Image (tube, helix red, strand yellow):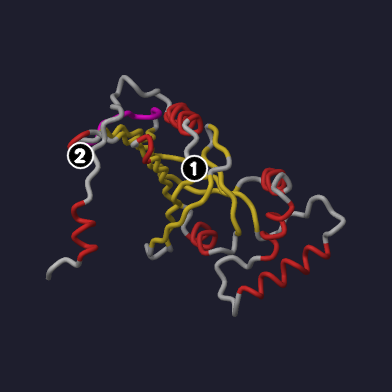
Amino acid sequence: MALSTIGAELAALRRNYTMASLSETDVDPDPFAQLERWMQQALNSELPEPTAMTLATATPEGRPSARVVLLKGFDARGLVFYTNYESRKGREMEQNPQAALLFFWPELERQVRIEGRVERVSPDESLAYFQSRPKESQLGAWASPQSQVISGRDVVEQRYQELAAQFKHDEVLPLPPFWGGYRVVPAYFEFWQGRPSRMHDRICYTLSEQGWVLTRLAP
Protein backbone atom coordinates (compact mmCIF):
# COMPACT_ATOMS: atom_id res chain seq x y z
CA MET A 1 0.00 0.00 0.00
CA ALA A 2 1.49 3.35 -1.06
CA LEU A 3 1.97 6.03 1.55
CA SER A 4 -0.15 9.15 1.26
CA THR A 5 1.62 12.48 0.94
CA ILE A 6 1.34 13.17 4.66
CA GLY A 7 2.36 9.59 5.40
CA ALA A 8 5.55 10.02 3.38
CA GLU A 9 6.28 13.28 5.18
CA LEU A 10 5.83 11.61 8.56
CA ALA A 11 8.07 8.70 7.64
CA ALA A 12 10.80 11.10 6.51
CA LEU A 13 10.83 13.20 9.68
CA ARG A 14 14.15 13.02 11.52
CA ARG A 15 15.71 14.89 14.40
CA ASN A 16 19.23 14.28 15.60
CA TYR A 17 19.63 14.78 19.35
CA THR A 18 22.96 16.40 20.18
CA MET A 19 22.53 18.55 23.29
CA ALA A 20 23.83 16.32 26.08
CA SER A 21 24.73 12.86 27.33
CA LEU A 22 23.84 10.91 30.46
CA SER A 23 26.01 8.38 32.25
CA GLU A 24 25.81 6.42 35.47
CA THR A 25 28.32 8.84 36.99
CA ASP A 26 26.18 11.85 36.04
CA VAL A 27 23.05 10.88 37.91
CA ASP A 28 22.19 11.08 41.60
CA PRO A 29 21.88 7.70 43.34
CA ASP A 30 18.46 8.84 44.57
CA PRO A 31 15.96 8.99 41.67
CA PHE A 32 13.86 11.63 43.45
CA ALA A 33 16.92 13.88 43.68
CA GLN A 34 17.64 13.22 40.00
CA LEU A 35 14.05 14.09 39.10
CA GLU A 36 14.30 17.29 41.14
CA ARG A 37 17.51 18.19 39.29
CA TRP A 38 15.95 17.70 35.86
CA MET A 39 12.68 19.36 36.87
CA GLN A 40 14.57 22.43 38.11
CA GLN A 41 16.44 22.61 34.82
CA ALA A 42 13.13 22.36 32.95
CA LEU A 43 11.69 25.18 35.08
CA ASN A 44 14.80 27.32 34.58
CA SER A 45 14.52 26.78 30.82
CA GLU A 46 11.02 28.31 30.91
CA LEU A 47 9.46 25.49 28.92
CA PRO A 48 5.76 25.99 28.05
CA GLU A 49 4.42 23.29 30.45
CA PRO A 50 7.34 21.76 32.37
CA THR A 51 5.05 20.02 34.89
CA ALA A 52 2.81 18.43 32.25
CA MET A 53 2.97 14.63 32.42
CA THR A 54 1.16 11.88 30.60
CA LEU A 55 -0.72 9.67 33.05
CA ALA A 56 -1.45 6.13 31.88
CA THR A 57 -3.97 3.97 33.71
CA ALA A 58 -5.72 0.69 32.89
CA THR A 59 -8.88 -1.19 33.71
CA PRO A 60 -8.64 -4.44 35.71
CA GLU A 61 -8.84 -6.22 32.34
CA GLY A 62 -5.79 -4.32 31.10
CA ARG A 63 -7.46 -1.84 28.73
CA PRO A 64 -5.19 1.23 28.88
CA SER A 65 -5.93 4.93 28.60
CA ALA A 66 -3.70 8.00 28.81
CA ARG A 67 -4.06 11.74 29.21
CA VAL A 68 -1.97 14.74 30.28
CA VAL A 69 -2.23 16.03 33.85
CA LEU A 70 -0.13 18.52 35.81
CA LEU A 71 2.31 17.60 38.56
CA LYS A 72 1.43 19.56 41.70
CA GLY A 73 4.14 18.35 44.04
CA PHE A 74 6.54 15.54 44.82
CA ASP A 75 8.77 14.34 47.61
CA ALA A 76 10.19 11.02 48.76
CA ARG A 77 6.64 9.65 49.10
CA GLY A 78 5.79 10.11 45.43
CA LEU A 79 4.34 12.43 42.78
CA VAL A 80 1.00 14.18 43.33
CA PHE A 81 -1.71 15.38 40.96
CA TYR A 82 -5.40 16.22 41.45
CA THR A 83 -8.55 15.22 39.63
CA ASN A 84 -12.17 14.17 39.88
CA TYR A 85 -12.41 10.77 41.60
CA GLU A 86 -15.36 9.88 39.33
CA SER A 87 -13.52 10.61 36.08
CA ARG A 88 -12.34 7.74 33.90
CA LYS A 89 -8.83 7.91 35.31
CA GLY A 90 -10.20 8.10 38.85
CA ARG A 91 -12.37 5.03 38.35
CA GLU A 92 -9.53 3.09 36.76
CA MET A 93 -7.09 3.96 39.55
CA GLU A 94 -9.60 2.85 42.16
CA GLN A 95 -10.09 -0.49 40.41
CA ASN A 96 -6.46 -0.99 39.38
CA PRO A 97 -4.16 1.15 41.58
CA GLN A 98 -1.15 1.10 39.28
CA ALA A 99 -0.11 3.92 36.95
CA ALA A 100 2.67 5.17 34.71
CA LEU A 101 3.82 8.76 34.23
CA LEU A 102 5.80 10.32 31.40
CA PHE A 103 7.47 13.73 31.28
CA PHE A 104 8.64 14.78 27.80
CA TRP A 105 10.80 17.89 27.44
CA PRO A 106 11.71 18.02 23.72
CA GLU A 107 13.52 21.33 24.10
CA LEU A 108 15.97 19.56 26.45
CA GLU A 109 15.87 16.29 24.47
CA ARG A 110 14.77 14.47 27.63
CA GLN A 111 12.02 12.29 28.97
CA VAL A 112 11.37 10.63 32.32
CA ARG A 113 9.25 7.51 32.75
CA ILE A 114 7.86 6.54 36.17
CA GLU A 115 5.82 3.50 37.21
CA GLY A 116 4.26 2.68 40.57
CA ARG A 117 1.23 2.13 42.71
CA VAL A 118 -1.38 4.80 43.33
CA GLU A 119 -2.89 6.06 46.57
CA ARG A 120 -5.11 8.98 47.50
CA VAL A 121 -3.53 11.87 49.35
CA SER A 122 -5.07 12.86 52.68
CA PRO A 123 -8.28 14.95 52.75
CA ASP A 124 -6.33 17.75 54.43
CA GLU A 125 -3.84 17.83 51.55
CA SER A 126 -6.65 17.85 49.00
CA LEU A 127 -8.50 20.63 50.83
CA ALA A 128 -5.39 22.80 51.15
CA TYR A 129 -4.59 22.50 47.45
CA PHE A 130 -8.21 22.91 46.32
CA GLN A 131 -8.66 26.14 48.25
CA SER A 132 -5.32 27.49 46.95
CA ARG A 133 -6.69 27.39 43.38
CA PRO A 134 -8.37 30.40 41.74
CA LYS A 135 -12.04 30.58 42.67
CA GLU A 136 -12.99 30.03 39.02
CA SER A 137 -11.11 26.72 39.03
CA GLN A 138 -12.84 25.69 42.25
CA LEU A 139 -16.21 26.41 40.65
CA GLY A 140 -15.19 24.45 37.57
CA ALA A 141 -14.34 21.40 39.66
CA TRP A 142 -17.76 21.51 41.32
CA ALA A 143 -19.59 22.12 38.03
CA SER A 144 -18.11 19.36 35.89
CA PRO A 145 -19.19 15.69 36.13
CA GLN A 146 -15.85 14.86 34.55
CA SER A 147 -15.80 12.14 31.86
CA GLN A 148 -19.59 11.71 32.01
CA VAL A 149 -21.69 12.02 28.84
CA ILE A 150 -23.59 15.33 28.71
CA SER A 151 -26.12 16.61 26.19
CA GLY A 152 -24.20 19.82 25.47
CA ARG A 153 -21.76 22.37 26.83
CA ASP A 154 -24.67 24.41 28.17
CA VAL A 155 -25.15 21.75 30.88
CA VAL A 156 -21.87 22.55 32.60
CA GLU A 157 -22.03 26.27 31.81
CA GLN A 158 -25.44 26.54 33.45
CA ARG A 159 -24.25 24.57 36.46
CA TYR A 160 -21.18 26.82 36.71
CA GLN A 161 -23.36 29.95 36.75
CA GLU A 162 -25.64 28.45 39.41
CA LEU A 163 -22.63 27.70 41.62
CA ALA A 164 -21.12 31.13 40.99
CA ALA A 165 -24.35 32.69 42.26
CA GLN A 166 -24.56 30.30 45.22
CA PHE A 167 -20.98 31.05 46.35
CA LYS A 168 -20.74 34.69 45.24
CA HIS A 169 -19.93 35.89 48.76
CA ASP A 170 -17.38 33.16 49.48
CA GLU A 171 -13.69 33.52 48.77
CA VAL A 172 -13.10 29.77 48.89
CA LEU A 173 -15.41 26.82 48.29
CA PRO A 174 -15.72 23.59 50.27
CA LEU A 175 -13.88 20.59 48.89
CA PRO A 176 -16.12 18.49 46.61
CA PRO A 177 -16.49 14.96 47.99
CA PHE A 178 -15.67 13.63 44.50
CA TRP A 179 -12.43 15.56 44.00
CA GLY A 180 -8.92 15.27 45.40
CA GLY A 181 -5.34 14.21 44.99
CA TYR A 182 -3.56 11.03 44.01
CA ARG A 183 0.02 10.09 44.72
CA VAL A 184 1.99 7.79 42.42
CA VAL A 185 4.46 5.89 44.64
CA PRO A 186 7.27 4.92 42.26
CA ALA A 187 8.89 1.52 41.96
CA TYR A 188 10.64 2.41 38.70
CA PHE A 189 12.22 5.49 37.10
CA GLU A 190 13.83 5.84 33.70
CA PHE A 191 15.78 8.94 32.65
CA TRP A 192 16.21 9.26 28.88
CA GLN A 193 18.60 11.65 27.19
CA GLY A 194 18.48 11.92 23.40
CA ARG A 195 21.75 11.20 21.58
CA PRO A 196 22.89 11.26 17.93
CA SER A 197 21.98 8.41 15.56
CA ARG A 198 19.24 7.23 17.94
CA MET A 199 21.92 5.93 20.33
CA HIS A 200 20.08 7.42 23.29
CA ASP A 201 21.12 7.18 26.93
CA ARG A 202 18.67 5.37 29.22
CA ILE A 203 19.43 5.16 32.94
CA CYS A 204 16.85 3.43 35.12
CA TYR A 205 16.23 2.88 38.83
CA THR A 206 14.34 -0.17 40.08
CA LEU A 207 13.23 -0.43 43.69
CA SER A 208 14.41 -3.56 45.52
CA GLU A 209 14.38 -4.65 49.15
CA GLN A 210 17.88 -3.19 49.46
CA GLY A 211 16.92 0.15 47.88
CA TRP A 212 17.23 1.63 44.40
CA VAL A 213 19.20 -0.39 41.85
CA LEU A 214 20.77 1.64 39.04
CA THR A 215 21.14 0.11 35.57
CA ARG A 216 21.59 1.17 31.95
CA LEU A 217 19.26 0.09 29.15
CA ALA A 218 20.14 -0.25 25.49
CA PRO A 219 18.68 2.52 23.30
Q: Nearest to the eye among marks 1 and 2: give it.
A: 1
Does 42 appear above or below 173? above
Looking at the rendering, the stretch of residues picked out in magenta corresponds to: 210-219
Quadrant in the picture for the C terminus = top left
Q: How many marks?
A: 2
Q: Give whichever of 22, 57 is nearer the camera.
A: 22
Helix, strand or loop for the magenta stretch, by majority: strand
**Image spot of residue 130 (x, y percent):** 69, 49
Quadrant in the picture for the N terminus = bottom left
Amino acid marked by disc 1: Pro
Is residue 217 covered in magenta? yes
- Sequence-earlier tag: 1 or 2: 1
Q: Disc 1 designates what residue? A: 48
**Image spot of residue 62 (x, y percent):** 37, 62
* Numbered tag placed on residue 198 in the rendering: 2
* Residue located 50% across and 29% down the image: 44
Label 2 element class: helix
Asked which quadrant contains residue 58, the reply is bottom left
